[in-house]
Image (spheres, rainbow, N blue to C red):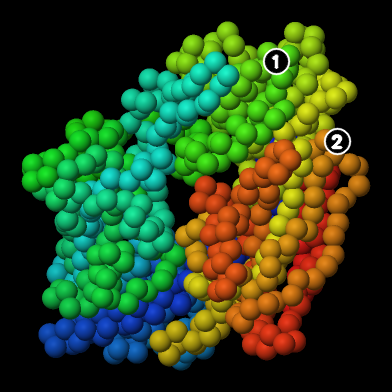
Amino acid sequence: MKTFCGRANPTTGSMEWLEEGEDYDYHQEIARSRYADMLHDKDRNVKYYQGIRAAVSRVKERGEKAIVLDIGTGTGLLSMMAASAGADFCYAIEVFKPMANAAVKIVEKNGFSDKIKVINKHSTEVIVGPDGDMQCRANILVTELFDTELIGEGALPTYEHAHKYLVQEGCEAVPHRATVYVQLVESRRMWSWKKLFPVHVEAEDGEKILLPPSEMENCPGVPSVCDIQLNQMPSSDFSTLSDVVKMFSVDFSKPVQSASTYYRVQLEPVKSGKAQIVLSWWDIDMDPSGMINCSMAPYWVKPTSALQWRDHWMQCVYFLPREEPVLQAEKLYLTACRDEYSVWYNLQKASPVCRCCAHVLWNRPRFGELNDQNRTRQYIKSLRKVLKPDSVCLCISDGSLLPVLAHYLGAKQVQCMQPSRIDLYHPHELWQAFFKANNLEDKIKIIEARPELLKPSHLEDKKISVLVGEPFFTTSLLPWHNLYFWYARTAVSAHLASNVTVLPQSASLHMMVVEFQDLWRIRSPCGTCEGFDVRTMDDMIKDSLNFRESKEAEPHPLWEYPCKSLSEPQEVLTFDFTKTVPQHCLSTEGSVKLLRKGKSHGAVLWMEYHLAADISVSTGLMQLSNEKGNCEWNPHCKQAVYFFSSVIESEILSDPTAVTYAINFDTKTGEIAMDFKL
C-alpha cells in the first residue's frame, strides 16, 4: 500500500503530494514521536509509579484482585509498573501496531508476559467478556492520554467510553484528577502574535502610518491554543493582572462527560491594565489525597521548586477575542469553553471566529515578525537606498508590508505577487482590505498570477527596475525553503530591466555546532526507565531515524530551547539573487572547530538575507555571548536542527576537535542534503 504525503516544494512555493512507501508513515510516527522525551521525564515517571503503587495497595487492602486497564500503553511502561507493584493482571491497550509490537517485546524482555496482555486495538473497540479481549472489567484505570492542552489527544471521550464499558464503578484511577489553572496577563510581545500594530514610516513628505483594516483590527481571531515553553518567556515580557486561579478539574475515577460545556470563575485583578492573554497549564494528582502531584506550572508560580524540563507537555497561551481594560480590585468573570478536544477563553459570551482571514493565513510567529519594528526598519533603510522616483517595483512574498513601504518611500509603480494559497483562503482579499484601509487601492496593484505566468500586460508593458522580497512564503518549513524567492526571480527574468536591483541581493546559509540544555532528550536513547529495560524502544527510534529522518534537519523555534555554541558561526553556502538559479548543484565541504567545552548534540542552520550594502537580516542567530557561548535566536523563525547520531564531549581546548561537514543544495528540488562527521 502506498502513502501520499504533502510536502512543500521550495522550487514552486506550493504544497505537493508525493507517493511514499508503505513504511513511510510508520517511520515518520516513530522518528518524530516524543517517546524519548516522555521516557526521560523523571518527574512524570516517578509520580506515575508512586500513584500506581498506591492504587494497587488500596485495591489489595479491600481484599480485591488488582486488575489494571492501561489505555495508550506505548512502551508498556505503566503496565510494567503496575505488575511490579503487585497487580494481578494488566490489559495494555495500544492502537498503533508497530508500538504494540514493541510493547510485547519490552514486556517479554522484562519478564512480565504472564501478567500483561497487550491489545492492539483502539480502546473503544475492546470487548469485555469470556471470549473478549478482557475477561472482566478492570478496577484500576491507568492512562497517559494528555497533551499540553490536557484534552487535545481525546482524553475525555476515551475516559467516557472506558467508564461505560471497560472499568468497574468506583474504580481507582491513575491519575486521579487533573486541574487546569489560568492567569490573566498583559503582554505586548504575546499580543503581537495576534494583532497587527500600526507601522510608522518616515517618508519625504512626512510621517506615514500604515494601519490594519478595521476587519482585522476588530477580528476576534481563532480560538486555537498556542503551546510554548513559558519558562523561556522573561518576566519583563508580560505583566500579571490576576492571581493564579483554578479554572476546572476532571475526576478520572468517576464517569467523565465529553460533551461541550463551559466553566466560569471570578477574578479580582491585582493591578489595572489591558487583559489580552490567558496563560494556562495543568497539574495531575496521582492519588485522591493530592499528595502525589505532577505540575506543569511555570517558573514564577513555584519559584522554589526544581523545574522538570519536558517538551511533550508545555504551557498554553490563549488570546482573548479582544483587548479588555481591567481595573485593580474590580471583579470580573472569565469563561472557559471546551469541546471534546480544545479549550478557549473569553471575558464575554461570544465565541471567537476569525473574520479577517489573517489569523487563518498567518501563524503566531508571522504576526510577531510583521510587528517587529527593528526588522521593519532594516527593510526601510534598504528600500531608501535602492528606490528612485521612476522605480517600477515588484514584490514577491506572502503577506508582506514591503509593497506599502515601497509606495510610501517614493516608488512610481508598485505591484505585488503572493504565490502561496491555503485551502479556501486567498490572501488577495486580505490585502485588498489592507490597501483600502490606507487609501492605497489605486496605488498598489495585486497581480493574481504565479511568477512563471507573469505577462507584460500585468506590468503595463514596463520593465521591473526593483524586485523585492522579504522573502517569506507560508509553505516554507525549513529556513532555506524561502529560497523560493530565487526561483520566482528566475521565472520573471524576462520582465526585469537590464540594470534591475534585487532586494535582497543575496542570501547565505550559516551553521554552528551547539550543546542543547534540554532539547537533546527528544533524540537521546533511554536504556532503562525506572528500572525497566526499554532498549527495544531505543532501537525502534534509531531504525526509524536511519530510514530517512537522521539525514534531514528538522525545524525548531530555538528561543524556546536554550543552547550554547561550541563553535563559531560559519557561513557555508551563498545564493546570488542578482543571477538566475544555476543548473548545477551548489556544494560545499569543510570543517568547524569546537572551541568550548561541552557535548556536541548537533548543528543549527539558518539563513541570512543581505538586503543592501551592510544591511542584513538573520532568521537565526541574533547575538552570541563569546564568553559562555549563550545564544539569542530570532523569536519569529524556526531554525533547522541536525542532530548528530553520536555525541562527542569536548574537554581539552588545547587540541580542539573538529566537525567536518558536506552540504549540497540541489537546485532541481530546492532541498539541502547534509552530512556531519565528528
Whether residue 581 is visible to the viewer of this picture, yes or no, is: yes
At 39% from the left and 58% from the top, the residue drawn is 233
Along the horizontal axis of the image, is 654 left or right of 399? right
Query: Marks 2 and 1, Cα distance to the nearest angstrom?
Result: 27 Å
Could you tell which of marks 2 and 1 lies nearer the N-terminus?
1
At 49% from the left and 21% from the top, the residue drawn is 207
Where disc 2 sits, the SS reads loop
Front one among 83 and 578: 578
Q: How many marks?
A: 2
Q: Amino acid at mark 1?
A: Pro
Along the horizontal axis of the image, is 35 left or right of 488? left
Q: Is residue 512 above or below residue 154?
A: below
* Quadrant including the C terminus: bottom right
At 85% from the left and 60% from the top, the residue drawn is 588
At 79% from the left and 54% from the top, the residue drawn is 573
Q: Position of residue 623 (x, y in %)?
A: 57, 59
Q: Which residue is mark 2?
A: 580
